[in-house]
Image: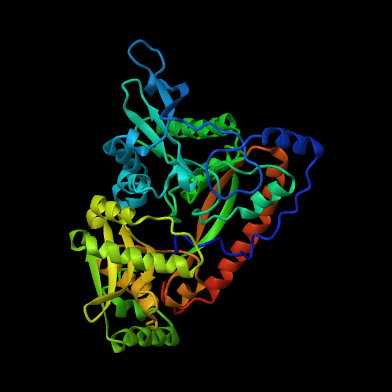
Amino acid sequence: MAFAGTAAPSSLFLGHLPFHLGKSSFAHFTHNSACVFKVKALFWGSRRSVKPADKVLPLGEFALSGAESQGDTGTAEKISVSVVSSISEVSPDEWDSCSLDSTGRQEFNPFLSHSFLSSLEESGSAVEGNGWISQHIIAKDESNNILGVVPLYLKSHSYGEYVFDHSWANAYYSYGLSYYPKLQCSVPFTPVTGPRILVSNTSHRDQVFDILVSAMKDLAIKFNVSSLHITFPTANEWHKLEKKGFLQRIGMQYHWKNRNYKNFDEFLMDMKQSKRKNIRQERKKISAQNVTMKRLRGSEIKANHWDTFYKFYRNTTDNKWGTAYLTRDFFHRMGAKMGDNVLLVVAEEGDEPVAAALNLIGGDTLYGRLWGCLPGTYYAHLHFEACYYQAIDAAIELNLSTVEAGAQGEHKIQRGYMPVTTYSSHYILDEDFKRVIDDFLVRESAQVKLVMQLLQDSGPFKENAWN
């Protein structure tokens, strides 16, 4: 489970980029990095001068080609593309329609919903003062219907992304150049895979997709940023973006898969005997410590639960020397807006809550997001119970196919969460930096694939369990 707010960890794969750039590149970037960017946040070096969209910034009109795009007059239908400075400029129904058409109802992704993204903005979590300036891209047809949307942010740092490019920023800085601001297409503070270019289900959706990607690239040039990053897209988007000049990067997470289990014990029977025994022992120790577990959903979660959870969340971020990105108001707003898509696992000793784990429920996936406990307390194996085992119980009960337990943590493997590939796409404007970063990513990808294979080979399941 990812801890939103923790600082970027050291990585086996990051290291230092061996940049060797020519004088022309150095001169070009030094000239472009003379002015100061206005966002108050942590930076490397000087910043580029950027004037983001104040409210709505038109990006132009684009003609749709093909017979299906011809009106009665035979002229090509046009769509207009613009940038809005807040998701509040888009109606929830229209945004969610694009999101649902992109995922399908069966694979509904709650993090792409208007409710979740607006909660981040309205609560002061993903806002300019924290280095996230909303610059969402909207595509409309001639009747003013929204055909596609892109969650996009102008960023002044690399925190809250979970795809680490700090070494890239340091490389720019070492040449006296500015890496920030940059454009980030993502869900803030959320390492969850899902569509990033959200297009409604029309006959020309492929063209709208291409236009939205082109609009992002044009905006990167217009804003004079160093780069555009699309993090945790789907594999399908990732492959499409390679053909449009984006560098490809892979990462790794740990997910649990439901193989039509009827209960937790049936899941355990697929595991090697030693792993099965260990998990049972860990679960028994929870009740031995007089701790009881509850799973609360939707209206069962009251305002006092969110106040308590925020205290737990702050304890986690404080202990991890991180930053509490999310405000107390975020949890209240998100809980009220998202209803039964929210699952809060609560651990109690007596009548007192001592720990909790926040999950969101999608169409076929349970997403584990945040965990925290009462300051100054320790309960053996409670983190595993609240974040991993209760999530498995809930997924089986709700007939969900997957539990995504967030970023990092090889300890998840021995508890049934296996490595899966995650994706990101990176559009680097400077050709010299692009070449060197591409070389780095090729080597990094080979290492990630090797590690994933080693972890798969040493997994906790019986050899014939998944045959």
Q: Position of residue 15 (x, y in %)?
A: 68, 61
Q: How many marks?
A: 0
Rendered residue at 36%/80% (across/down):
268
* Foreground residue among 117 and 95: 117
**Which image quadrant: the N terminus?**
bottom left
Q: Which quarter of the image is occupied by the C terminus?
A: bottom left
Residue occupying image coordinates x 30% and y 46%:
115
Q: Relative to 14, is 261 above or below? A: below
Q: Is residue 338 above or below residue 282?
A: above
Q: Position of residue 391 (x, y in %)?
A: 33, 69
- Colour scheme in use: rainbow
In the visual, does 424 lie left or right of 82? right
Camera-nearest residue between 425 and 82: 82
Residue located farthest toward the left when viewing the structure as drawn:
299
Give the quarter of the image for residue 372.
Answer: bottom left
Residue 290, x across and y down, in percent: 27, 86
Residue 360: % across, % down? 32, 59
At horizontal 46% and vertical 73% (from top left) the residue drawn is: 412
Q: Is residue 309 left or right of residue 10?
A: left
Q: From the viewer's perspective, is 425 left or right of 29?
A: left
* Residue 254 appears in the rendering: yes
Quick one: 171 or 279, which is closer to the camera? 171
